[in-house]
């Protein structure tokens, strides 16, 4: 993208002195992005926890954006959860995320934010998309029914980002991460995604001496996992090197079965019992591996291996287990 109203918006190094708003800076992704930006020399980071700024409150969001006047925004705030939470509360996942996105993106445009990065999820793609999933698979088939409401909200965010580019010529972009994990994740029994749920389940079983752990489904679905610190690194890289209308997949390019990741986590936490599988519970999408060639073309590949990431995440979980949310 070239100039708009005489301003050159071509990708390049971001201004380290400019105000940079990270929406959702206390969450898994937002906190990792905050750490990455601090380490990269950004001097004016702003953000507010949800207890102080409800992003579903349109007037409050507009007021905050008007006060802080950020030059850059990363929208990492979202209502997220695993299969159980998504399938139980679809209205909440659709309504809350739609309101968060529309409020933040509208306020960003009203306040002339130059560069916005909207973060979605790989669940936006069809349930039976060709593997690995390319960006152009979007809207080509039916969604996974256990999280279709959340996926529709995220698709709407992508389209709003693209619409701003078409209508106003601003270099706003969006990125779709694979399954993320790491510090500040949600480890609650009812609201967490698969990897943090497994860490908690196996760690508690190890501490209690339980002879078995029971997991949902068959264990055969394949999933790709990316450490949140890698995701944060990719986000800054995209902001400085990518400018295009298509969402960009962010992942490692490799996957494992749920059974394999469960066995690995069991080994990391020291669980020596048996694992059982409740096949009456849903598996979700059979495979969800992202094609990350567009990201590679932009000059970025993942750096944190799954084994290293799991070691770091289990250590963080055990250090913070008494103060975790949920």
Image: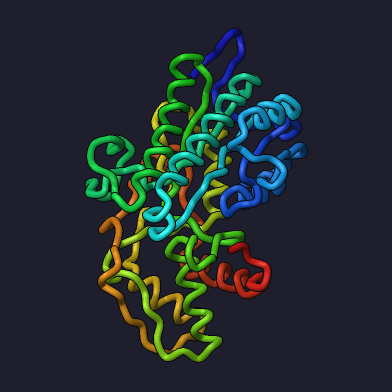
Which residue is depicted at the point 53% across and 81% down? 204
Residue lying at 42% horizontally and 76% vertically, measured from the top left: 264
Q: In this rendering, does residue 22 appear at all?
A: yes
In front of the other: 269 or 26: 26
Vertical placement of 126 versus 115: above or below?
A: below
Q: Is residue 38 left or right of residue 106?
A: right
Count of number-bearing discs: 0
In the rendered image of this protein, does residue 68 appear above or below residue 276? above
- The colour scheme used to paint the residues is rainbow
Relative to residue 322, is residue 271 drawn left or right?
A: left
In the image, taking residue 305 as reference, residue 144 lies left or right, namely: left
What percent of the width, then of the height, locates residue 16?
A: 72, 35
x, y (%) of residue 225? Answer: 43, 59
Residue 180 in the image: state x and y as whole percent. Answer: 48, 56
Residue beneath the point at 41% across and 32% down = 156
Give the residue at x 42% y 46%.
Answer: 121
Look at the image and tell me whether residue 296 can be seen.
no
As displayed, is residue 198 above or below residue 11?
below
Residue 115 percent across, percent down from the top left? 58, 27
**Observer-nearest residue: 307 or 54?**
54
Image quarter where the C terminus lies is bottom right
Q: Which residue is at the far top?
A: 5
Left or right relative to 275: residue 96: right
């Amino acid at each position: 993208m070239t100039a708009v109203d005489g301003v050159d918006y071509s990708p390049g190094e971001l201004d380290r002195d400019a105000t940079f708003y990270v929406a959702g800076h206390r969450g898994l992704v937002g906190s990792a992005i905050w750490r990455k930006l601090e380490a990269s020399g950004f001097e004016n980071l702003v953000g507010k926890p949800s207890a102080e700024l409800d992003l579903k409150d349109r007037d409050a969001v507009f007021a905050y954006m008007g006060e802080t006047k950020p030059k850059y925004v990363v929208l990492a705030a979202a209502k997220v959860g695993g299969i159980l939470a998504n399938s139980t509360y679809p209205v909440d996942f659709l309504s809350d995320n739609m309101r968060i996105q529309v409020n933040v993106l509208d306020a960003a445009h009203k306040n002339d934010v130059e560069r916005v990065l909207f973060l979605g999820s790989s669940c936006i793609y069809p349930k039976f998309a060709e593997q690995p999933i390319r960006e152009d698979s979007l809207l080509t088939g039916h969604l996974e029914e256990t999280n279709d409401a959340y996926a529709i909200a995220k698709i709407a965010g992508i389209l709003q980002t693209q619409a701003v580019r078409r209508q106003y010529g601003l270099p706003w972009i969006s990125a779709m991460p694979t399954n993320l994990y790491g510090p500040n994740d949600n480890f609650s029994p009812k609201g967490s995604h698969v990897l943090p749920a497994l860490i908690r389940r196996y760690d508690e079983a190890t501490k209690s001496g339980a002879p078995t752990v029971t997991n949902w489904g068959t264990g055969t679905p394949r999933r790709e996992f990316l450490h949140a610190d890698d995701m944060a690194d990719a986000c800054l890289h995209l902001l400085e090197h990518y400018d295009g209308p298509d969402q960009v997949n962010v992942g490692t390019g490799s996957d494992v079965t749920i059974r394999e990741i469960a066995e690995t986590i069991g080994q990391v936490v020291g669980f020596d019992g048996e694992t059982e599988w409740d096949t009456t519970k849903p598996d979700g999408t059979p495979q969800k591996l992202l094609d990350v060639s567009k990201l590679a073309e932009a000059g970025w590949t993942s750096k944190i291996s799954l084994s290293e990431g799991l070691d770091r995440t289990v250590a963080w979980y055990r250090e913070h287990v008494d103060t975790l949310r949920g």
